[in-house]
Image: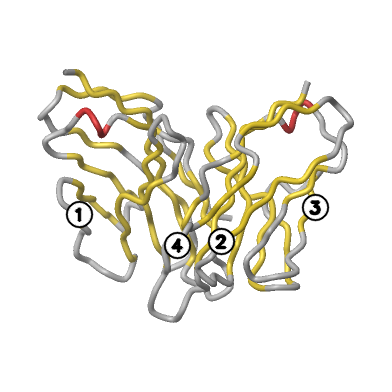
């Protein structure tokens, strides 16, 4: 199992450029999510998905789009990059919660994005 | 909305000593999960320990244990026999037990330094 993989590991964009951060998992997890990590602010939820074809907004969704066409993949799109989107981005996945168990969320290695 | 507060931005401890990291949270829910994640310089998010709110017994994992005080909404992490490899950022996180609400709410983190 590769777990949760993210590409690229590092990226530099100019203001106004667009790009897609890739996330894939091979654990057949229903739940996938994207977080951003900024100094002094912990991790904040951008978007999440509870299964193929279903996505929803998290705490800081503006400027980002997601789609979930397969169980394995959950790409994050920046439509027009802004310096405020300079951050470290993490993808995470888990099984959906059952009545009695909260399943561990597995994190990818992160993507460090700089927007100049 | 739930909030998680870590009031110690930085902590340091001598190698082999014990250190306690603090975390408080605010929620109106009665059933939930609490987590401590470790983020070493590699950036990878690693689950250290998990506590179910319905369990009165404090969770332990080898040298890591928690002091869970539900009424006080407090969830501290104790690291015994600190080792150099424990140096990292530590994040406290909250997750609702409601089905379909899998998102994690993180605190702002505590940077732990181990002094040889």
Q: Which residue is mark 3?
A: A65
- Residue placed furthest toward the bottom: A99
CA gap between label 4 and label 2 equals 9 Å
User: Going by the picture, which residue comes out furthest to the front?
Assistant: A1
4 vs 2, front mark:
4
The answer for which chain carries disc 2 is A
- The 10 Å Cα crowd at callout 1, few under 14, some 14 to 19, many 20 or more, is few
Residue A86: assigned label: none
Q: CA distance from mark 3 to mark 2?
A: 19 Å
Q: Nearer the viewer, residue A69 or A30?
A: A69
**Which one is nearer the viewer's eye here, A71 or B3?**
A71
Local packing at callout 4 (Cα closer than 10 Å; few below 14, some 14-19, many 20+) is few
Residue under circle 1? Answer: B61
In the image, residue A13 lies at what x, y percent?
78, 28
Please tell me whether mark 4 or mark 1 is closer to you in this view. Answer: 4
Q: Is residue B71 left or right of residue A11?
A: left
Same chain assignment for discs 2 and 1: no
Q: Residue at x 64, y 44 (%)?
A: A7
For the residues labelled 2 and 1, the Cα–Cα distance comes to 27 Å
Mark pair 4, 3: CA separation: 28 Å
Name the residue that disc number 2 marks: A25
Number of numbered discs visible in the structure rendering: 4
Q: Earlier in the sequence, mark 3 or mark 2?
A: 2
């Amino acid at each position: 199992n590769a777990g949760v993989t993210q590409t690229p590991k590092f990226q530099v964009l100019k203001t106004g450029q667009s790009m897609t951060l890739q996330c894939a998992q091979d654990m057949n997890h229903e739940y996938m999510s994207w977080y951003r990590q900024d100094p002094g602010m912990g991790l904040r939820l951008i978007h999440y998905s509870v299964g193929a074809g279903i996505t929803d907004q998290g705490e800081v969704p503006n400027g980002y789009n997601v789609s979930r066409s397969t169980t394995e993949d959950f790409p994050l799109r920046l439509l027009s990059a802004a310096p405020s989107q300079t951050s470290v981005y993490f993808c995470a996945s888990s099984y959906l919660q059952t009545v009695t168990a909260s399943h561990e969320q597995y994190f990818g290695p992160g993507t460090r994005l700089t927007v100049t | 909305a739930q909030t998680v507060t870590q009031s110690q931005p930085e902590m340091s401890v001598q190698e082999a000593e014990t250190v306690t990291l603090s975390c408080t949270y605010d929620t109106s829910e009665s059933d939930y999960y609490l987590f401590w994640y470790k983020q070493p310089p590699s950036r990878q998010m690693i689950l250290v320990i998990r506590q179910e709110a319905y369990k009165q017994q404090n969770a332990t994992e080898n040298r890591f244990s928690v002091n869970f005080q539900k009424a006080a909404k407090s969830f501290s992490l104790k690291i015994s026999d600190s080792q150099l490899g424990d140096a990292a950022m530590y994040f406290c996180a909250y997750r609702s037990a409601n089905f379909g609400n899998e998102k994690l709410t993180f605190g702002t983190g505590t940077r732990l330094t181990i002094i040889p």
